[in-house]
Amino acid sequence: MTGTLKKDTIKGVFWSFIDRFGTQFILLITQIVLARLLTPEDFGLIGMLSIFIAVSQVFVDSGFGNALIQKKDANQTDYSTVFYFNIGVGFLLYGILFFSAPYIASFFQEEKLIGLTRLIGLLLIFNSLGLIQFVKFKKDLDFKSIAKATMISNVIAAILGIMLAFLNFGVWALALQMVCIYFFRSLLFWILSMWRPTWEFSYISFKGLFNFGSKLLLSGLLDQIFQNVYLLIIGKLFSTKDLGYYTQAKKFQDVPVTTLAAIVGNVTFPAFSKIQDDKEKLLIGFRKTLKLLVFVNFPLMLGLAVVAQPFFLFVFGPQWLPSVPYFQLLCISGMVYTLHTTNLSILQVKGRSDLFLRLEIIKKGITVIAIFIGLQWGIMGLIYGRVVTSFIGYFINAHYSGELLNYPILNQLKDLSPSMMISIIMAILMITCTYFLELSISLFLLQICIGIISYFLISYFTKQEALIDGLKIIKEFIPLNSWKTKKY
């Protein structure tokens, strides 16, 4: 990478970190409070609508966001064209959800879903209004503006959601919180961005972007359907309470995984797109990214799986303990999520959205088989199938991204193995604590301390490249003088 691009990328990672971790911290605190004020059934009702909202969100963007980022010479006509398309799709999909609400409620046999669907569906319109500003910020690596808008909107929505829960609004507190996040985020994007649409819509521009974006649209649809199909199946075949337990487990497994993937993915995709024609630089950046990701994600996921029981007991309360086994298995699946997204980003950077779509079809076929087999053993069987398909999917993604970069999957596994081994040692040390202390807050805190200290000490003494690179990035972003004691 050039010096300027490298500096912008590091700055982007920093602000993306502030954005995602700040946002997730706010959401985590909010969900902890709401979990103690609301019931598993309330969360289950929201979970029933997840697949409909997630699929609709994919249609709103339609892959055009990444198409604009990937296109080096995107102009005002391109942005305005996509802007009007996004808004049109947003209103259209809201209309479909509005009139489909009674049928959705009938499918799940939950009358409350009629009003909930019509309320939550509004976020599609609000999201469509701010998508282009978001894309502009992202392409320019201006993650500072994204962080401001996202964190402020989440704070406002969190306060509103908690207030409504205290006033006994029940599930409506969760629904209004979701809608408010998107409303205030888009409003702030318009305030912070200088970009405004012009009155033009180009069919030629639309067609060019659609050629790339349409394949990402279909890939995104497949991914969101299969990411949320478990909610649909559990909501239909099991109780609302069971779905609430699964929803809570999935939500808190998603917090660290999707946060880390978003922090890195949001920055590396536009950065890698700028050097897409320099295979050597692209490979170097890709390898360093992978190593840093697993250095953080592997120990995080294994550590959370170990402390799952005290975490749910003391943070959310005993009523949420049935979520623990779901959460532990989902953490194992989450270990490879960031590897999925990073390997797939290479396909997008190289303009291979056709291959991206083909791989999604293959992986979803495997997922269908896993679902049918797993259903024989209930919810746990479904999650075991999800773990297996996650690892199979990773090997498929890594094989094809490796072919594009001359980076065979065996070399990739070799790069990842040190972090995996150290993470396993860390997890064993954490588990050992349970033989000396009973289940308590003291055990919970001790396991966390032992996990963090042991992982970084072993990494330091074995001179792990990812740790060294991480420290270099921190020092490069923070001026050297700030690391030294000032003399007076």
Image (cartoon, helix red, strand yellow):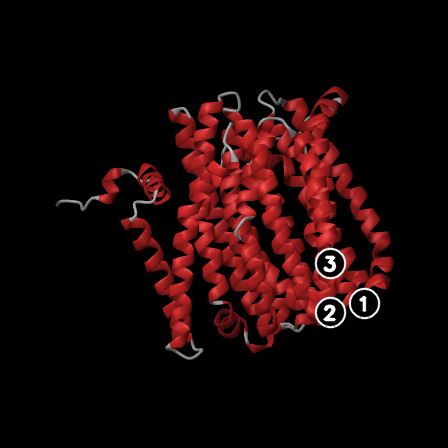
- What kind of residue is marked 3? Ile
For the N terminus, give its image quadrant: top left
Q: Nearer the viewer, residue 326 or 178?
A: 326
Up-down: is 439 above or below 56? below
Spatial separation of the CA atoms under disc 1 and disc 2 = 9 Å
Evaluate if marks 2 and 3 touch, with contact meaning CB atoms under 8 Å apart. Answer: no
- What kind of residue is marked 1? Glu
- The residue under the point 41% across, 36% down is 10
Spatial separation of the CA atoms under disc 1 and disc 3 = 28 Å
Q: Earlier in the sequence, mark 1 or mark 3?
A: 1
Q: Nearer the viewer, mark 1 or mark 2?
A: 2
Is residue 290 among the parts visible in the rendering?
A: yes
Spatial separation of the CA atoms under disc 2 and disc 3 = 23 Å
Percent coordinates x, y for residue 317 in the rendering: 54, 75
Evaluate if marks 1 and 2 touch, with contact meaning CB atoms under 8 Å apart. Answer: yes
Q: Nearer the viewer, mark 2 or mark 3?
A: 3
- Residue 240 is labelled as 2
